[in-house]
Image (tube, rainbow, N blue to C red):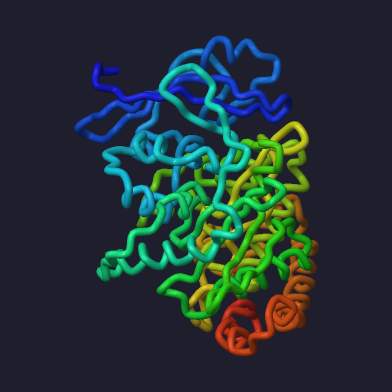
């Protein structure tokens, strides 16, 4: 490494004891061809009986330095702890980040997962009360609107408290949001309306989460708050619990060893993720089958934003498990013949592997531990449930017939392409 490397100590709050300890050291090396990241586990950490790998695939527990040029030199486990698109925008309002390490260090300890960072080996003191208080949620929504107006070129002279917008509120998303804390110390993600919304997104996403739960998919608790003329979605953080409990978190993007790219979807695959789950999950069969159920649900409900940052594993009951599902919502597209998932789910020669189609889903079922007959029956079960229940579920969230009309295109009764035969059927 060169002498101009930038670095930080990496800490982890161990899920067994709750102790915050140094896991290792990360260095970011500037390079004319692109930044290179270096990570080395500390010897004292490797000697612990309760150690866990920051990433069991790409940062296994072993001596020596591991390097990466992906994600501008930021290892996936660290990239997950960094702000998402919206968080980066918030940071840029008060900081002048020059590289990925700057974004990482500007993120508060309400970040997702169990990692934290610091300039020395002294463990940071995490704040039990971190997060925006619920009583300030309306002001936080106003602050988000100011930033959205600025992004649209309508710079406001209004100055709002930057502490109202926590840049650590999630992974992989552009939606305006912040982290809020309730009176019990539980953290929630608060998602605000966005300028680009075609419908009431809070009601739509809450509907999808409830509908997914009815389809046998694990989801976090959620609720919609009406503040003035705004509908705000609150989603309970599944990586955190009151009492400074932090659970290690890894996105599918990190587990699959992917690079940040707006055009390259190489490696975006439910099938590949199922194989990773079989390697690292403490309940591999259960998790692989639930991942398949989620792929079917996304296909049936036209959730085309199912990219690898919207799937993850979380440390639970002594090991890695597929996390509860999150960021599920209808897509804007209205194609009748071919709606494409973000991740590949089919394995039929000559057929687009991302096509949200029954035959495509059945073709890959063995990778998830299901026989084709089981997969076909499951698809029919979920299809019938979703088509018959989505309007009632939406009404249980909020009595908004207009929203139902606006998102009706997302469901199978208006997407015959789901049942079109594929080349092998």
Residue in the picture at 29% in, 41% down: 97
Q: Is residue 79 left or right of residue 17?
A: left
Residue 419 location in percent, x, y?
Answer: 64, 78
Residue 331 location in percent, x, y?
Answer: 52, 73
| In this view, 17 is above or below 130 | above
Splitting the image into 4 quarters, where does residue 422 fall?
Answer: bottom right
Q: In this view of the protein, can residue 332 be seen by the observer? A: yes
| In this view, 227 is above or below 104 | below
Viewer-nearest residue: 52 or 67: 52
- Count the marks: 0
Viewer-nearest residue: 266 or 41: 41
Splitting the image into 4 quarters, where does residue 206 fall?
Answer: bottom right
Viewer-nearest residue: 400 or 146: 146
Residue 254 location in percent, x, y?
Answer: 51, 41
Residue 351 location in percent, x, y?
Answer: 51, 66
| In this view, 172 is above or below 111 | below
Residue in the picture at 46% in, 62% down: 176
Given the current orientation, which residue lies at the most extreme left position?
A: 32
| In this view, 178 is above or below 32 | below
Residue in the picture at 58% in, 36% down: 127
- The image quadrant where one finds the C terminus is bottom right
Residue in the picture at 29% in, 17% down: 1
Q: In this view of the protein, can residue 357 be seen by the observer? A: no
């Amino acid at each position: 490494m060169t002498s101009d490397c930038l670095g930080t100590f990496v800490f982890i709050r161990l899920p067994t004891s709750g102790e915050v300890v140094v896991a290792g050291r990360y260095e970011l090396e500037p390079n004319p061809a692109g930044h290179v990241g270096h990570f080395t586990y500390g010897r004292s950490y490797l000697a612990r009986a309760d150690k866990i790998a920051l990433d069991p695939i790409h940062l296994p527990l072993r001596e020596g330095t591991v390097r990466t040029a992906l994600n501008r030199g930021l290892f996936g486990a660290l990239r997950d702890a960094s702000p998402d698109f919206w968080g980066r925008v918030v940071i840029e309002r008060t900081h002048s980040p020059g590289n990925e390490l700057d974004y990482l260090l500007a993120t508060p300890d309400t970040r997702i997962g169990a990692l934290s960072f610091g300039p020395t080996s002294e463990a940071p003191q995490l704040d039990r009360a971190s997060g925006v208080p619920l009583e300030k949620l309306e002001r936080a929504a106003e602050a988000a609107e100011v930033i959205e107006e600025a992004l649209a070129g309508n710079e406001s002279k209004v100055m709002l408290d930057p502490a109202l917008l926590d840049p650590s509120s999630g992974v992989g998303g552009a939606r305006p949001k912040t982290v809020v804390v309730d009176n019990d110390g539980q953290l929630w993600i608060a998602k605000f309306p966005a300028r680009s919304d075609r419908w009431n997104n809070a009601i739509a996403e809450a509907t999808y989460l409830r509908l997914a739960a009815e389809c046998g998919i694990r989801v976090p608790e959620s609720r919609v708050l009406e503040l003035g003329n705004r509908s705000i979605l609150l989603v309970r953080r599944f990586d955190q619990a009151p009492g400074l409990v932090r659970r290690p978190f890894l996105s599918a993007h990190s587990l699959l060893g992917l690079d940040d790219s707006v055009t390259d979807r190489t490696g975006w695959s439910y099938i590949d993720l199922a194989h990773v789950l079989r390697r690292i999950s403490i309940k591999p069969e259960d998790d692989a089958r639930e991942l398949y159920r989620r792929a079917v649900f996304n296909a049936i409900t036209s959730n085309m934003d199912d990219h690898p940052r919207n799937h993850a594993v979380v440390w639970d009951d002594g090991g890695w498990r597929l996390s509860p599902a999150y960021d599920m919502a209808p897509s804007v597209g209205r194609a009748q013949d071919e709606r494409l998932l973000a991740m590949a789910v089919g394995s039929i020669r000559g057929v687009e592997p991302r096509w949200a189609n029954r035959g495509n889903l059945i073709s890959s079922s063995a990778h998830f531990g299901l026989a084709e007959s089981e997969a076909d029956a499951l698809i029919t079960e979920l299809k019938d449930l979703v088509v018959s229940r989505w309007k009632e579920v939406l009404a249980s969230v909020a009595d908004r017939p207009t929203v139902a009309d606006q998102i009706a295109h997302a469901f199978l009764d208006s997407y015959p392409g789901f049942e079109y035969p594929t080349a092998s059927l």
